[in-house]
Amino acid sequence: MSIIAAIVIFSVIVLFHEFGHFTLARACGVEVLEFSLGMGPRLLSHVSKKSHTRYSLKLLPFGGSCLMKGEDTDDMSPGAFGTKKVWQRILIVAAGPVFNFVLAFLFAAVIIGSAGYDAPVPEYVAEDSPMAMAGVAAGDEITSLDGRRITIYRDIVNYATFVLDDRVPGSRIPVEWVHDGKPMSAEIALKSTNGSLASVLGIYGGGRFSAHGNVLVILRYAAYEVKYWIGTTLSSLGMIGRGRVSLDDVSGPVGIVGVISDTYRETRKEGAFMLFLNMLNMAILLSANLGVMNLLPFPALDGGRIVLLIIEQIRRKKLGDNIEAYINLAGFAVLMGIMVFVMFNDVRKLL
Protein backbone atom coordinates (compact mmCIF):
# COMPACT_ATOMS: atom_id res chain seq x y z
CA MET A 1 0.00 0.00 0.00
CA SER A 2 2.87 2.39 0.76
CA ILE A 3 4.27 1.88 -2.76
CA ILE A 4 0.85 2.70 -4.21
CA ALA A 5 0.77 5.90 -2.11
CA ALA A 6 4.19 6.90 -3.48
CA ILE A 7 3.09 6.23 -7.07
CA VAL A 8 -0.11 8.25 -6.58
CA ILE A 9 1.85 11.21 -5.17
CA PHE A 10 4.38 11.12 -8.01
CA SER A 11 1.62 10.78 -10.59
CA VAL A 12 -0.40 13.73 -9.29
CA ILE A 13 2.68 15.98 -9.16
CA VAL A 14 3.84 15.06 -12.68
CA LEU A 15 0.30 15.28 -14.08
CA PHE A 16 -0.14 18.78 -12.67
CA HIS A 17 3.26 19.83 -14.07
CA GLU A 18 2.31 18.66 -17.55
CA PHE A 19 -1.15 20.18 -17.13
CA GLY A 20 0.59 23.53 -16.71
CA HIS A 21 2.29 23.16 -20.10
CA PHE A 22 -1.00 21.91 -21.58
CA THR A 23 -3.08 24.80 -20.23
CA LEU A 24 -0.77 27.56 -21.46
CA ALA A 25 -0.19 25.81 -24.79
CA ARG A 26 -3.93 25.70 -25.43
CA ALA A 27 -4.32 29.31 -24.24
CA CYS A 28 -1.61 30.46 -26.67
CA GLY A 29 -3.07 28.52 -29.59
CA VAL A 30 -0.50 25.73 -29.73
CA GLU A 31 -1.88 22.37 -30.83
CA VAL A 32 -1.29 19.62 -28.24
CA LEU A 33 -0.81 16.30 -30.01
CA GLU A 34 -0.80 14.10 -26.90
CA PHE A 35 -1.24 14.57 -23.17
CA SER A 36 -0.16 11.48 -21.27
CA LEU A 37 0.39 10.18 -17.77
CA GLY A 38 3.13 7.59 -17.45
CA MET A 39 5.71 6.30 -19.88
CA GLY A 40 6.02 3.39 -22.28
CA PRO A 41 3.22 1.63 -24.20
CA ARG A 42 -0.31 3.05 -24.02
CA LEU A 43 -2.79 1.24 -21.80
CA LEU A 44 -5.73 3.55 -22.48
CA SER A 45 -6.12 6.26 -25.09
CA HIS A 46 -8.77 8.68 -26.29
CA VAL A 47 -8.62 11.27 -29.09
CA SER A 48 -10.74 14.38 -28.60
CA LYS A 49 -12.94 15.11 -31.61
CA LYS A 50 -12.84 18.83 -30.83
CA SER A 51 -9.12 19.46 -30.21
CA HIS A 52 -7.71 16.28 -31.80
CA THR A 53 -5.54 15.84 -28.69
CA ARG A 54 -4.81 12.26 -27.70
CA TYR A 55 -5.17 11.62 -23.95
CA SER A 56 -3.19 8.56 -22.84
CA LEU A 57 -2.51 6.45 -19.78
CA LYS A 58 0.75 4.55 -20.20
CA LEU A 59 2.22 1.43 -18.65
CA LEU A 60 4.99 2.82 -16.42
CA PRO A 61 3.51 4.96 -13.61
CA PHE A 62 6.33 7.52 -13.58
CA GLY A 63 6.60 10.64 -15.66
CA GLY A 64 4.25 12.11 -18.20
CA SER A 65 4.30 14.36 -21.23
CA CYS A 66 2.57 17.16 -23.07
CA LEU A 67 3.56 16.70 -26.71
CA MET A 68 3.07 19.93 -28.64
CA LYS A 69 3.04 20.34 -32.40
CA GLY A 70 6.46 21.47 -33.65
CA GLU A 71 7.96 21.50 -30.14
CA ASP A 72 11.23 19.84 -31.17
CA THR A 73 11.13 20.41 -34.92
CA ASP A 74 11.22 23.32 -37.35
CA ASP A 75 7.51 22.90 -38.15
CA MET A 76 6.06 26.38 -38.77
CA SER A 77 2.56 25.33 -39.80
CA PRO A 78 -0.48 26.84 -38.01
CA GLY A 79 -0.71 25.73 -34.37
CA ALA A 80 2.98 24.81 -34.13
CA PHE A 81 5.01 25.80 -31.06
CA GLY A 82 7.62 27.66 -33.12
CA THR A 83 5.07 30.01 -34.70
CA LYS A 84 4.29 31.68 -31.38
CA LYS A 85 5.99 34.79 -30.03
CA VAL A 86 8.97 34.25 -27.72
CA TRP A 87 7.10 35.52 -24.66
CA GLN A 88 4.28 33.04 -25.36
CA ARG A 89 6.72 30.15 -25.65
CA ILE A 90 8.41 31.21 -22.40
CA LEU A 91 5.03 31.21 -20.65
CA ILE A 92 4.25 27.73 -21.98
CA VAL A 93 7.61 26.34 -20.85
CA ALA A 94 7.51 28.06 -17.44
CA ALA A 95 3.93 26.96 -16.76
CA GLY A 96 4.95 23.43 -15.72
CA PRO A 97 7.15 24.50 -12.78
CA VAL A 98 4.74 27.31 -11.86
CA PHE A 99 1.87 24.81 -11.67
CA ASN A 100 4.04 22.71 -9.33
CA PHE A 101 4.27 25.70 -7.00
CA VAL A 102 0.50 26.23 -7.31
CA LEU A 103 -0.13 22.57 -6.41
CA ALA A 104 2.20 22.85 -3.41
CA PHE A 105 0.30 25.99 -2.34
CA LEU A 106 -3.08 24.22 -2.57
CA PHE A 107 -1.82 21.24 -0.56
CA ALA A 108 -0.30 23.59 2.03
CA ALA A 109 -3.61 25.43 2.38
CA VAL A 110 -5.34 22.11 3.12
CA ILE A 111 -2.78 21.20 5.80
CA ILE A 112 -2.79 24.62 7.44
CA GLY A 113 -6.57 24.84 7.34
CA SER A 114 -6.79 21.42 8.99
CA ALA A 115 -3.85 21.30 11.40
CA GLY A 116 -2.59 24.88 11.70
CA TYR A 117 0.84 26.36 11.03
CA ASP A 118 4.14 26.37 12.90
CA ALA A 119 4.36 29.93 14.20
CA PRO A 120 7.93 31.13 14.95
CA VAL A 121 7.25 31.10 18.68
CA PRO A 122 9.64 29.22 21.02
CA GLU A 123 8.00 27.48 23.95
CA TYR A 124 11.10 27.78 26.13
CA VAL A 125 14.15 30.07 26.15
CA ALA A 126 17.14 28.80 28.12
CA GLU A 127 18.45 31.02 30.90
CA ASP A 128 21.72 32.80 30.05
CA SER A 129 21.35 31.83 26.38
CA PRO A 130 21.99 34.44 23.65
CA MET A 131 18.24 34.84 23.05
CA ALA A 132 17.43 35.20 26.76
CA MET A 133 20.18 37.76 27.25
CA ALA A 134 18.72 39.79 24.36
CA GLY A 135 15.34 39.78 26.09
CA VAL A 136 13.49 37.12 24.08
CA ALA A 137 11.01 35.19 26.23
CA ALA A 138 8.96 32.05 25.72
CA GLY A 139 5.84 32.85 23.71
CA ASP A 140 7.43 35.77 21.84
CA GLU A 141 7.16 35.73 18.05
CA ILE A 142 10.52 35.94 16.29
CA THR A 143 10.16 38.01 13.09
CA SER A 144 13.74 38.47 11.86
CA LEU A 145 17.07 36.77 12.44
CA ASP A 146 20.36 38.04 11.05
CA GLY A 147 18.49 40.18 8.52
CA ARG A 148 16.36 37.26 7.32
CA ARG A 149 12.61 37.50 7.61
CA ILE A 150 11.15 34.75 9.78
CA THR A 151 7.61 33.63 8.98
CA ILE A 152 7.46 30.05 10.30
CA TYR A 153 9.47 28.22 12.94
CA ARG A 154 11.29 26.14 10.34
CA ASP A 155 12.84 29.35 8.96
CA ILE A 156 14.79 29.47 12.21
CA VAL A 157 15.77 25.81 11.81
CA ASN A 158 16.93 26.53 8.24
CA TYR A 159 19.04 29.42 9.48
CA ALA A 160 20.79 27.10 11.91
CA THR A 161 21.24 24.46 9.18
CA PHE A 162 22.41 26.55 6.24
CA VAL A 163 23.82 29.82 7.61
CA LEU A 164 25.25 29.43 11.11
CA ASP A 165 28.27 27.46 9.89
CA ASP A 166 29.40 30.60 8.04
CA ARG A 167 29.48 32.58 11.29
CA VAL A 168 32.22 32.45 13.90
CA PRO A 169 31.80 32.29 17.69
CA GLY A 170 31.49 35.79 19.04
CA SER A 171 29.69 37.08 15.95
CA ARG A 172 26.87 39.49 16.68
CA ILE A 173 23.65 39.09 14.73
CA PRO A 174 20.49 41.22 14.86
CA VAL A 175 17.23 39.68 16.00
CA GLU A 176 13.72 41.14 15.96
CA TRP A 177 10.68 39.80 17.78
CA VAL A 178 7.24 40.76 19.11
CA HIS A 179 6.66 40.74 22.88
CA ASP A 180 3.11 41.36 24.14
CA GLY A 181 2.26 43.00 20.81
CA LYS A 182 5.27 45.34 20.94
CA PRO A 183 8.08 45.08 18.31
CA MET A 184 11.50 44.55 19.91
CA SER A 185 15.03 44.33 18.51
CA ALA A 186 18.53 43.62 19.78
CA GLU A 187 21.83 42.03 18.83
CA ILE A 188 22.87 38.66 20.18
CA ALA A 189 26.41 37.34 20.54
CA LEU A 190 26.89 33.77 19.34
CA LYS A 191 28.75 31.66 21.86
CA SER A 192 28.88 28.79 19.38
CA THR A 193 27.94 28.26 15.72
CA ASN A 194 27.90 24.48 15.70
CA GLY A 195 24.97 22.58 17.13
CA SER A 196 21.21 22.60 17.53
CA LEU A 197 18.97 25.61 17.98
CA ALA A 198 18.85 24.78 21.66
CA SER A 199 22.62 24.81 22.09
CA VAL A 200 23.38 27.77 19.79
CA LEU A 201 20.47 30.17 20.30
CA GLY A 202 18.90 28.71 23.42
CA ILE A 203 15.35 28.20 22.13
CA TYR A 204 13.30 25.03 22.47
CA GLY A 205 9.97 23.49 21.70
CA GLY A 206 8.67 25.40 18.69
CA GLY A 207 7.62 24.02 15.35
CA ARG A 208 4.29 22.45 16.25
CA PHE A 209 1.46 22.89 13.75
CA SER A 210 -0.96 24.38 16.25
CA ALA A 211 -1.57 28.06 15.40
CA HIS A 212 -4.81 28.77 13.50
CA GLY A 213 -6.34 31.74 11.68
CA ASN A 214 -8.96 32.85 9.19
CA VAL A 215 -8.93 32.17 5.44
CA LEU A 216 -6.52 35.02 4.70
CA VAL A 217 -4.11 33.74 7.36
CA ILE A 218 -4.34 30.23 5.91
CA LEU A 219 -3.53 31.49 2.41
CA ARG A 220 -0.67 33.66 3.68
CA TYR A 221 0.93 30.80 5.57
CA ALA A 222 0.38 28.45 2.63
CA ALA A 223 2.48 30.89 0.59
CA TYR A 224 5.09 30.94 3.37
CA GLU A 225 5.14 27.13 3.29
CA VAL A 226 5.87 27.06 -0.47
CA LYS A 227 8.49 29.79 -0.04
CA TYR A 228 10.12 27.72 2.71
CA TRP A 229 10.44 24.60 0.53
CA ILE A 230 11.70 26.60 -2.45
CA GLY A 231 14.32 28.22 -0.22
CA THR A 232 15.27 24.89 1.33
CA THR A 233 15.75 23.33 -2.11
CA LEU A 234 17.93 26.23 -3.29
CA SER A 235 19.97 26.18 -0.07
CA SER A 236 20.49 22.42 -0.42
CA LEU A 237 21.67 22.88 -4.02
CA GLY A 238 24.04 25.57 -2.78
CA MET A 239 25.50 23.20 -0.18
CA ILE A 240 26.02 20.57 -2.89
CA GLY A 241 27.73 23.17 -5.08
CA ARG A 242 30.03 24.20 -2.22
CA GLY A 243 30.88 20.58 -1.48
CA ARG A 244 29.18 20.55 1.93
CA VAL A 245 26.83 17.78 0.84
CA SER A 246 27.98 14.79 -1.17
CA LEU A 247 26.03 13.49 -4.15
CA ASP A 248 25.96 10.22 -2.18
CA ASP A 249 23.45 11.95 0.12
CA VAL A 250 21.14 12.92 -2.75
CA SER A 251 18.08 10.73 -3.34
CA GLY A 252 16.44 9.91 -6.65
CA PRO A 253 13.05 8.32 -7.36
CA VAL A 254 13.93 5.04 -5.63
CA GLY A 255 15.10 6.81 -2.48
CA ILE A 256 12.09 9.14 -2.47
CA VAL A 257 9.71 6.19 -2.78
CA GLY A 258 11.52 4.69 0.20
CA VAL A 259 11.05 7.88 2.24
CA ILE A 260 7.35 8.06 1.33
CA SER A 261 6.93 4.37 2.22
CA ASP A 262 8.65 4.89 5.59
CA THR A 263 6.47 7.93 6.31
CA TYR A 264 3.37 5.94 5.36
CA ARG A 265 4.26 3.04 7.66
CA GLU A 266 5.18 5.31 10.59
CA THR A 267 2.07 7.50 10.46
CA ARG A 268 -0.74 5.11 9.50
CA LYS A 269 -0.89 3.93 13.13
CA GLU A 270 -1.83 7.52 14.08
CA GLY A 271 -5.01 7.32 12.03
CA ALA A 272 -6.22 8.11 8.54
CA PHE A 273 -6.31 11.88 9.10
CA MET A 274 -2.67 12.14 10.21
CA LEU A 275 -1.63 9.78 7.41
CA PHE A 276 -3.41 12.01 4.89
CA LEU A 277 -1.71 15.16 6.23
CA ASN A 278 1.73 13.55 6.21
CA MET A 279 1.30 12.35 2.64
CA LEU A 280 0.21 15.87 1.65
CA ASN A 281 3.30 17.27 3.36
CA MET A 282 5.51 14.94 1.32
CA ALA A 283 3.66 16.05 -1.82
CA ILE A 284 4.33 19.72 -0.99
CA LEU A 285 8.04 19.02 -0.60
CA LEU A 286 8.25 17.05 -3.85
CA SER A 287 6.11 19.42 -5.91
CA ALA A 288 8.09 22.50 -4.83
CA ASN A 289 11.33 20.60 -5.38
CA LEU A 290 10.29 19.55 -8.89
CA GLY A 291 9.36 23.14 -9.71
CA VAL A 292 12.74 24.47 -8.60
CA MET A 293 14.74 21.73 -10.30
CA ASN A 294 12.92 22.23 -13.60
CA LEU A 295 13.66 25.96 -13.55
CA LEU A 296 17.42 25.44 -13.25
CA PRO A 297 19.12 26.94 -16.35
CA PHE A 298 20.36 23.56 -17.54
CA PRO A 299 19.86 22.12 -21.05
CA ALA A 300 16.92 19.71 -21.39
CA LEU A 301 15.18 21.24 -18.35
CA ASP A 302 12.46 23.86 -18.60
CA GLY A 303 14.89 26.46 -17.24
CA GLY A 304 17.40 25.64 -19.96
CA ARG A 305 14.73 26.01 -22.64
CA ILE A 306 13.77 29.40 -21.21
CA VAL A 307 17.42 30.52 -21.42
CA LEU A 308 17.55 29.49 -25.09
CA LEU A 309 14.34 31.42 -25.76
CA ILE A 310 15.76 34.51 -24.05
CA ILE A 311 18.89 34.20 -26.23
CA GLU A 312 16.62 33.96 -29.26
CA GLN A 313 14.85 37.15 -28.20
CA ILE A 314 18.16 38.99 -27.72
CA ARG A 315 19.54 37.79 -31.08
CA ARG A 316 16.20 38.39 -32.82
CA LYS A 317 16.53 35.00 -34.45
CA LYS A 318 16.50 31.34 -33.45
CA LEU A 319 19.58 29.31 -32.79
CA GLY A 320 20.15 26.77 -35.52
CA ASP A 321 17.99 23.70 -35.02
CA ASN A 322 21.09 21.51 -34.96
CA ILE A 323 22.78 23.70 -32.34
CA GLU A 324 19.73 23.65 -30.06
CA ALA A 325 19.34 19.90 -30.56
CA TYR A 326 22.99 19.27 -29.66
CA ILE A 327 22.72 21.47 -26.56
CA ASN A 328 19.60 19.65 -25.36
CA LEU A 329 21.08 16.25 -26.20
CA ALA A 330 24.23 17.01 -24.22
CA GLY A 331 22.16 18.24 -21.27
CA PHE A 332 19.92 15.19 -21.43
CA ALA A 333 22.95 12.88 -21.46
CA VAL A 334 24.39 14.58 -18.38
CA LEU A 335 21.03 14.43 -16.59
CA MET A 336 20.66 10.73 -17.39
CA GLY A 337 24.17 10.12 -16.08
CA ILE A 338 23.34 11.88 -12.83
CA MET A 339 20.05 9.98 -12.56
CA VAL A 340 21.75 6.62 -13.07
CA PHE A 341 24.36 7.53 -10.44
CA VAL A 342 21.71 8.66 -7.94
CA MET A 343 19.50 5.61 -8.55
CA PHE A 344 22.53 3.34 -8.12
CA ASN A 345 23.17 5.00 -4.75
CA ASP A 346 19.50 4.60 -3.81
CA VAL A 347 19.61 0.87 -4.57
CA ARG A 348 22.96 0.48 -2.80
CA LYS A 349 21.51 2.06 0.36
CA LEU A 350 18.65 -0.45 0.29
CA LEU A 351 20.99 -3.45 0.14
Image (spheres, helix red, strand yellow):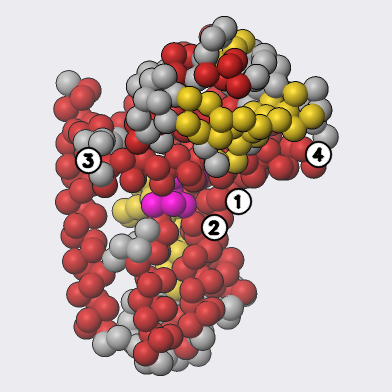
Mark 4 residue type: Val
Mark 3 residue type: Gly
- Provide the residue designation for mark 2: 98
- Provide the residue designation for mark 1: 102
- Provide the residue designation for mark 3: 243
Marks 2 and 1, how far apart at CA:
6 Å
- Queried whether the magenta region covers residue 287, the answer comes back as yes
For this rendering, which residue is in front, 42 or 298? 298
**Front label number (4 vs 3):** 3
Q: Secondary structure at mark 1?
A: helix
Residue lying at 48% horizontally and 82% vertically, measured from the top left: 86
- Queried whether the magenta region covers residue 340, the answer comes back as no
Residue 215 - label: 4
Marks 1 and 4, how far apart at CA:
17 Å
Give the left or right position of residue 141, taking residue 245 as reference: right
Asked whether the residues under the numbered discs 4 and 3 touch, taking CB atoms below 8 Å apart as contact, a structural biologist would say no
Q: Secondary structure at mark 2?
A: helix
Name which of mark 3 and mark 1 comes first in the sequence.
1
Q: Secondary structure at mark 4?
A: helix
